[in-house]
Image (spheres, rainbow, N blue to C red):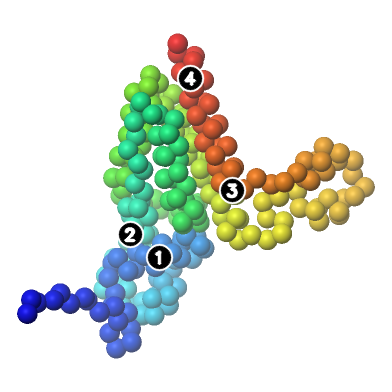
Amino acid sequence: MPATSRRRPTTRKGRPVLTREAIAAKALEMAGTQGFRSVTMRALAAELNVTVRALYNYVEDRQDVVDLALGLMLDSWNPPPLDPTAWEESVAGYARSLRKLYRRWPRALLVSLDEDAPPTSVHPNRLLNLDRFLQLLHGIGIGFPTALEVHRHLSLLMLSFALVVDRPATHATTDRGTLVPDVWLAAHADLDLPALRQAAALPIPTADTQFDQLVSVVIAQIRSHLDAST
């Protein structure tokens, strides 16, 4: 009979078998929902049901854990091929890849605010994907300074969208996502706010609709640069 491969057990004597990959995954899960400040060695050990001492058999220190978690996050960022002959869809596809990454671990995006020390290394995807996006814009006739401006604009829009729109949408309550909650207006019924009250009564577009509008803004920005160059 042919030999069958044996899977490595995930637990031993009731405790999980630790790996650097498992530590990174749990740290990223914690950072994605609570921010990197929640990822202490003690809290991480508790989440993994191991001792702090056991963690140090696999990682150097907390900075090593942060680097592993960020590496795991960026490993999953794989934009679709970018084609200058279909640049509008390529820009939209690139934006969708960022949205997918950001909405999966929204609080992890605030690593630069949570951490005093920057990551000790730069993930290749941060360089490769940026280079490909710049090549896309350069391929349709946009200079590199303007291409960088477009990318900065897109990145800032996607960051704010993930934190302000996508994340609240996954924790929906009655007033989440509204322009102004009804209780705010009710609390200030004496204020003369005709435009705001009329706007607040309008239906709120879905997160997907708002995302499409965001992408349209970036595409319009690129078109304006193309028109100006011709």
Residue at 83% in and 50% down: 185
Is label 1 in contact with label 3 (beta carbons under 8 Å)?
no
Pick whichever of labels 2 and 4 is earlier in the sequence: 2
Between tags 3 and 2, which lies in front? 3
Is label 3 in contact with label 4 (beta carbons under 8 Å)?
no
- Which amino acid lies under the numbered mark 3 shown in the image of this protein? Ala
106 above or below 199? below
Q: Which residue is denoted by mark 3 in the rendering? A: 207
59 above or below 185? below
Pick whichever of labels 2 and 1 is earlier in the sequence: 1
- Which amino acid lies under the numbered mark 4 shown in the image of this protein? His
Can residue 206 be seen by looking at this rendering?
yes
Q: Which residue is denoted by mark 1 in the rendering? A: 27
| Dot 2 crowding, Cα within 10 Å, few <14, some 14–19, many 20+ | many
Q: Which residue is denoted by mark 2 in the rendering? A: 68
- Which amino acid lies under the numbered mark 2 shown in the image of this protein? Leu
Q: Which residue is denoted by mark 4 in the rendering? A: 225
| Dot 4 crowding, Cα within 10 Å, few <14, some 14–19, many 20+ | some
| Dot 1 crowding, Cα within 10 Å, few <14, some 14–19, many 20+ | many
In front: 28, or 117?
Answer: 28
Task: Kindly indicate the quadrant of the structure image that contains residue 133.
Answer: top left
